[in-house]
């Protein structure tokens, strides 16, 4: 079986860092900006950035409907920060017109930790990565407020609030694995593709 | 509100270089728009701005009005923060660390130590390491960029010439910075000492560029962007995001132009899309010839 072709949504944000992280794992990821580019990939990474900007661009690039269809069809996806917001069922504290894909049954709150001066890095235990904590970078990060049945919580912060979840082939994190040299979250996602 | 679960994370650190540069990474491929009131902030966010710069007058008005340009009134900055969900930046005068302290206390997401305002110190930029809030600074060349980074800047924007709607200076500055980065990657280890001397920049930063081929922090572009084609031009020249000041709200149809510049920045290599989004935008801001200017803002800072 040929290897899965992995795309990175490249409308805005930290997409180049995801492409670099995947390259370090031997995966030649392609940037996705158009419906044709989307049709050419088997899995998609939705990077950090501004979720409102990406929502607008998904519409203007005519990507929203085709991507919604692919996700409904079970395409594996990794969403980090803004990417997690886009993949969620419900966005709290978002714009009234903000749309999300509902690819994972969670409700997320935008900027839940406060403003940039409250952004932080910390060590985090992640389910499935027992060897050492993941050094997680949270930038104006969202948090998961509600989790539906069938969603596995992969990591939590104080108070039991989830910051990483998985449902089927969809993995999401509040934090930015692409900002750290630790590639294990990307590896965890790639294992989903191989499964 | 969120504090009960913020505290208690092991070794939780705020204001680190990774966290500060991290936000700049998240703004890449985007457009940061100057806004002077909440209404403009709404238009900017609706158009897809990744962040807004809150200021009392856009650069073209500062240029026209003259006088001393200072940090904006906190009330005005708070009014803009209240209506937008995207990051809010604000400007402090070069060297005016108290204005920066105030902006940090207000919870702005990025401070721009900006030549658009009247400098407060003729010898010293702000010691930006002393702050939790990240800073962006302007630069006309690589040496200036590296001096700002050594002072703690986490994002560099090429200066261009703000308030002119004329892209020529932005092109000069981004070409100069990118060109010198390329040349340094070709230099041997002995030549790097000479580069550091010539650029008046710290040797370790020059050595880092030689190794990575990249500026140590994100490089954005500002000063004179007025059209979607201008944005795509500087992106093709190596900018990683753009600041648009007077170019949007001094044009005839700001909402349409703002959206077009956002789409052009994402699709900066796709001439078909650039042709499409450049259509029917109405008149751009009139613009100024650089030779006719009384004050070149880019000359402020060193």
Image (cartoon, coloured by chain):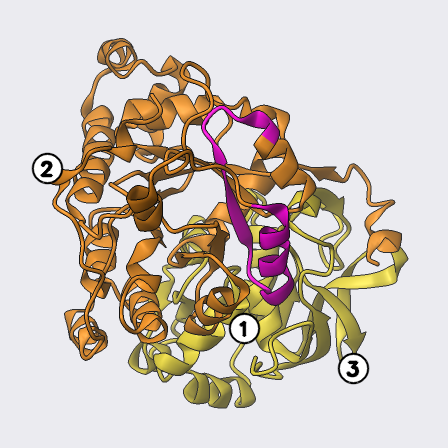
Kindly indicate whether the residues beneath marks 2 and 1 are on one polypeptide chain: no
Q: Residue A23 lies in magenta, yes or no?
A: no
Residue drawn at (63%, 34%), measured in percent from left and top? B16
Closer to the eye: label 2 or 1? 2
Q: Name the element at disc 3.
A: loop
Residue A55 placement, left or right of A40: right
Q: Secondary structure at mark 1?
A: strand
Choose between B262 and B25: the one closer to the eye.
B262
- Chain B tint in image: orange
Q: Which chain gets the yellow colouring?
A: A
Circle 2 residue: B291
Mark 1–mark 3 distance (CA, rounded to whole Å): 18 Å
Co-location on one chain, circles 2 and 3:
no
Point out the frontmost of discs 1 and 3: 3
Quadrant where the C terminus of chain B is found in the figure: top left
Residue at the spot 46% in from the left edge and 54% down from the top edge:
B27
Which chain's residue wears label 2?
Answer: B
- Give the distance between the C-alpha atoms of the residues marked 2 and 1, in whole angstroms: 53 Å
The quarter of the image holding the N terminus of chain B is bottom right
**Magenta region: which residues?**
B73-98
Would you name the residue on which mark 3 appears?
A: A148
- Coordinates of residue A23 in the picture (x, y in percent): 41, 52
Q: Tell me the tag on residue A77.
A: 1
Residue B175 lies, in percent from the top left, at: 18, 38
Coordinates of residue B184 in the picture (x, y in percent):
23, 24
Q: Nearer the viewer, residue B278 or A151?
A: B278
Label 2, secondary structure: give it: helix
- Rendered image quadrant of residue A114: bottom right
Is residue A191 visible to the viewer in this orientation of the structure? Answer: no
């Amino acid at each position: 079986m040929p290897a899965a072709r992995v795309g990175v949504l490249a409308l805005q944000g930290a997409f180049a860092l995801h492409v670099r992280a995947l390259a370090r794992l031997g995966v030649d990821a392609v940037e996705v900006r158009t419906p044709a580019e989307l049709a050419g990939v088997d899995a998609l990474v939705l990077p950090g950035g501004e979720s409102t900007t990406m929502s607008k661009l998904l519409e203007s690039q005519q990507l929203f409907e085709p991507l919604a269809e692919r996700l409904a069809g079970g395409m594996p996806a990794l969403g980090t920060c803004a990417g997690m917001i886009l993949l969620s069922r419900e966005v709290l504290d978002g714009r009234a017109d903000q749309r999300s894909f509902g690819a994972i049954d969670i409700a997320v709150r935008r900027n839940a930790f406060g403003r940039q001066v409250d952004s932080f890095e910390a060590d985090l235990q992640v389910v499935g990565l027992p060897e050492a904590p993941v050094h997680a970078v949270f930038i104006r990060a969202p948090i998961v407020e509600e989790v539906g049945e069938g969603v596995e919580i992969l990591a939590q912060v104080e108070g039991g609030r989830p910051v990483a979840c998985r449902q089927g082939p969809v993995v999401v994190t509040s934090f930015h694995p692409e900002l750290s040299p630790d590639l294990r979250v990307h590896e965890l996602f790639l294992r989903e593709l191989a499964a | 509100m969120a504090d009960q679960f913020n505290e208690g994370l092991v070794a939780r650190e705020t204001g680190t270089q990774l966290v500060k540069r991290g936000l700049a990474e998240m703004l890449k491929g985007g457009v940061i728009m100057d806004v002077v009131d909440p209404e403009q902030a709404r238009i900017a966010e609706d158009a897809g701005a990744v962040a807004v710069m809150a200021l009392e007058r856009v650069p073209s008005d500062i240029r026209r009005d003259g006088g001393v340009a200072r940090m904006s009134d906190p009330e005005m900055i708070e009014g803009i923060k209240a209506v937008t969900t995207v990051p809010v930046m604000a400007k402090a005068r070069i060297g005016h660390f108290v204005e920066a302290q105030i902006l940090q206390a207000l919870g702005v997401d990025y401070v721009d130590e900006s030549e658009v305002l009247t400098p407060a110190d003729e010898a010293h930029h702000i010691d930006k390491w002393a702050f939790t809030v990240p800073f962006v600074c302007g630069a006309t060349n690589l040496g200036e960029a590296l001096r700002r980074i050594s002072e703690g800047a986490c994002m560099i924007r090429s200066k261009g010439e703000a308030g002119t709607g004329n892209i020529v200076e932005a092109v000069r500055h981004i070409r100069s910075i990118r060109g010198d980065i390329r040349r340094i990657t070709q230099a041997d280890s002995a030549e790097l000492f000479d580069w550091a001397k010539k650029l008046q920049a710290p040797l370790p930063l020059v050595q880092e560029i030689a190794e990575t081929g990249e500026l140590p922090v994100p490089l954005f572009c500002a000063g004179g962007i007025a059209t979607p084609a201008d944005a795509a031009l500087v992106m093709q020249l190596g900018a990683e995001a753009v600041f648009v000041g007077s170019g949007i709200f001094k044009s005839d149809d700001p909402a349409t132009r703002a959206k077009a510049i956002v789409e052009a920045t994402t699709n900066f290599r796709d001439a078909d899309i650039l042709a499409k989004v450049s259509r029917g935008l109405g008149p751009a801001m009139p613009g100024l010839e650089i030779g006719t200017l009384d004050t070149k803002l880019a000359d402020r800072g060193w």
